[in-house]
């Protein structure tokens, strides 16, 4: 009996080992870890700087003919199943009286409108808004990550009137001078300015003829 038990014991241990292996399947192909995430960002042509587990980098692109420069970050989720990419936006005013409730409601409404894993959030540590996108960490490549960053950039540009703190200030009631049309006058064109999610001023003082 003892000899039979001695023969069965290795089989039991082997079967339990196989079950344990089946319970922990290997990560899917194209799954990035902390190191390879930085390598993919570098392969795109960015210059990521690692801060703790997060990679910070500048991202420049053109959105509908306008040049934008973004401060972005990328980090793995705690379970490494997702990649979080975020664009850093304006700093939140220190006075609560400078944060209209309507502006916050518009941010919440934008979260529903954008979809595709994108949403506005507030980072308490540095008191800034961010626009984030959550991407599945599967079959990831330089092409897919670049598409995610570009998609995030377009949403930042489209939602500029919503997140720009400068737009929250009450509008001046002072009447503006009328601009003559069709006489070749130099008129301001706000859509021609360079926009950035970093600078305090979002538009340069440009004029078009």
Image (cartoon, rainbow, N blue to C red):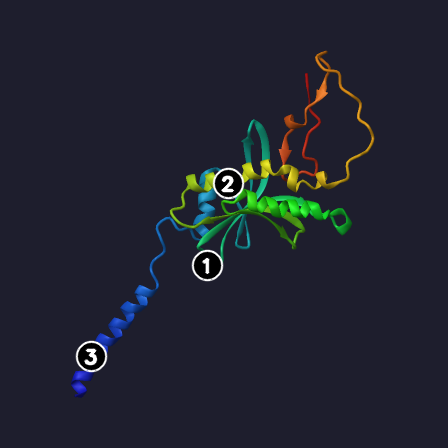
Q: Distance between the residues labelled 3 and 1?
A: 38 Å
Q: Is mark 1 on a helix, strand or loop?
A: loop
Contact between labelled residues 1 and 3, with CB atoms less than 8 Å apart: no
On the question of residue 181 being in view, the answer is: yes
In the picture of the structure, the residue carrying the numbered disc 3 is: 8
Quadrant where the image shows the N terminus? bottom left
Front one among 175 and 15: 175
What crowding class fits label 1: few (fewer than 14 Cα within 10 Å), some (14-19), or many (20 or more)?
A: few
Image height of 137 relative to 150, above or below: below
Quadrant where the image shows the C terminus? top right
Residue 101 percent coordinates (x, y) = 71, 48
Residue 64 percent coordinates (x, y) = 55, 28
Q: In which quarter of the image is residue 157?
A: top right
Image height of 21 relative to 80, above or below: below
Contact between labelled residues 1 and 2, with CB atoms less than 8 Å apart: no
In the picture of the structure, the residue carrying the numbered disc 2 is: 149
In the picture of the structure, the residue carrying the numbered disc 1 is: 79
Q: Earlier in the sequence, mark 2 or mark 1?
A: 1
Looking at the image, the residue that sits furthest to the right is 174
Residue at 63%, 36% in the rendered image = 196
Residue at 44%, 40% in the rendered image = 43
Taking the image as shown, residue 16 lies to the left or right of residue 43, namely: left
Front one among 66 and 3: 66
Q: Earlier in the sequence, mark 3 or mark 2?
A: 3
Q: How far apart are marks 2 and 1 (CA)?
A: 21 Å
């Amino acid at each position: 009996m003892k000899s039979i038990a001695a023969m069965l014991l290795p089989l039991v241990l082997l079967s339990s080992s196989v079950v344990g292996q089946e319970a922990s399947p290997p990560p899917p192909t194209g799954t990035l870890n902390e190191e390879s995430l930085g390598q993919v960002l570098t392969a795109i042509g960015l210059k990521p700087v690692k801060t703790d587990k997060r990679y910070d980098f500048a991202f420049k692109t053109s959105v509908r003919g306008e040049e934008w420069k973004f401060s972005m970050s990328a980090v793995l989720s705690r379970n490494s199943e997702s990649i979080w990419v975020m664009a850093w936006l304006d700093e939140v005013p220190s006075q609560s009286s400078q944060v209209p409730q309507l502006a916050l409601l518009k941010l919440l409404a934008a979260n529903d409108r954008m979809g595709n894993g994108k949403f506005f959030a507030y980072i308490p540590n540095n008191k800034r808004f961010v626009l984030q996108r959550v991407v599945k960490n599967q079959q990831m490549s330089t092409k897919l990550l670049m598409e995610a960053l570009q998609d995030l950039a377009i949403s930042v540009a489209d939602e500029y009137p919503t997140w720009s703190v400068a737009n929250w200030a009450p509008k001046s009631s002072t009447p503006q001078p009328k601009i003559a049309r069709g006489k070749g006058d130099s008129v301001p064109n706000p859509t021609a300015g360079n926009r950035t999610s970093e600078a305090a001023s979002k538009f340069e003082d440009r004029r078009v003829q």
